[in-house]
Image (cartoon, grey):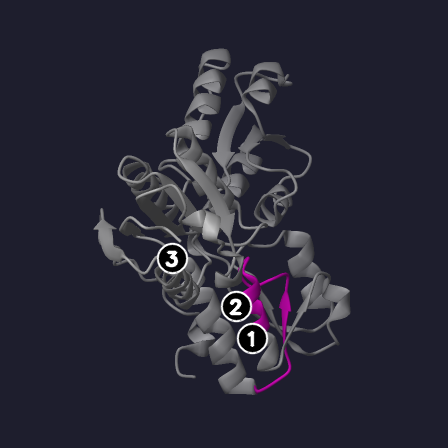
Amino acid sequence: MNEEKLEIVLASPRGFCAGVDRAILIVEKALQKWGAPIYVRHEIVHNRQVVERLQAQGVIFVEEIEDIPKGAHAIFSAHGVSPAVRQQAQEQSLEVVDATCPLVTKVHGEAQRYRRKDFTILLIGHADHVEVQGTMGEAPEQMIVIETVQDAEKVQLPDPNQVAYLTQTTLSLDDTFEIIKILKQRFPSIEGPPKDDICYATQNRQNAVKELASQVERILVVGASNSSNTLRLVEVAKAQGTEARRVEEASQIERDDVMGVRSVGITAGASAPEDVVQSIVAKLCELAPQHSVRELKLVDENVNFALPALLRTA
């Protein structure tokens, strides 16, 4: 048992962002309006607890459109889909509600704009991430995924004067900065989005983790293993020289998490529910009877995204 008093510091903002709130609400409203089953292509957000709760209410998650019966009610996840997937849904006569985060939709719009200009598009992101796969579908013949600084240094273009870059919304700001810097050095005429594609919530959570890392000895990041922004938060914390690990639920909290330190910080990825965060706090308090809990608030988030018109009255 930790004999010294343990300070537990909660980063704020943390957890659900406006895009995740909207996506989950879309599924809940669809259930109210049409009843079960509602089909969702891919996990609505990358969080097991959220997915399991919705499954219990009659939501069926699938990876392929062909797994959805013709004419059924279907929802596209917050990560976005390619035009080919939209076409498949149309061919299946699905009644589709689109839960794509508006910030991801913005990136798709930029990809379409550069495709029309016949540019090569360098998409900074992780090739295996569902958001990147959806964006790639907007211009598969013209788009190249750039995952690392090394990719940026090596990429060859058919016309260096006809090039633009876009970014996955959930990357590390610092990593993206380095890649963009190299691309701008190599291709001085490269165009980029009018505003950074990295979303406000990703930026705010990363800034909060940097500040948290300066005040605590160990950080626990709450979120799923397939949540890109959660993994980036772990990386950002470690880059500050602070010990950090990812946890999904209170059962993963161990005595070692409170041993040998006087302060533990907690944050959560944009798809991690607050009730899970609080259950982890409760477990830490149980393991360290002598404790205090405080919140480290950097900014207030008051962003809201409107629901699709079809569900506003549900």
Magenta extent? 35-53
Res. 220 mark: none
Quadrant in which the C terminus is drawn: bottom left
Q: Is residue 188 above or below residue 97?
A: above
Q: Nearer the viewer, residue 38 or 258?
A: 258
**Inter-mark Cα distance, 2 to 1:** 6 Å
Q: Which residue is mark 3?
A: 17
98 with respect to 58 (left or right)? left
Sequence-wise, the earlier of marks 1 and 3 is 3
**Residue 312 % position (x, y):** 40, 77
259 with respect to 36 (left or right)? left
Other residues around mark 3 within 10 Å, as few (<14) / some (14–19) / many (≥20): many
Q: Which residue is mark 2?
A: 50
Question: Mark 1 is on which residue type?
Answer: Leu
Res. 54 mark: 1
**Residue 113 % position (x, y):** 50, 39
**Residue 84 % position (x, y):** 69, 53
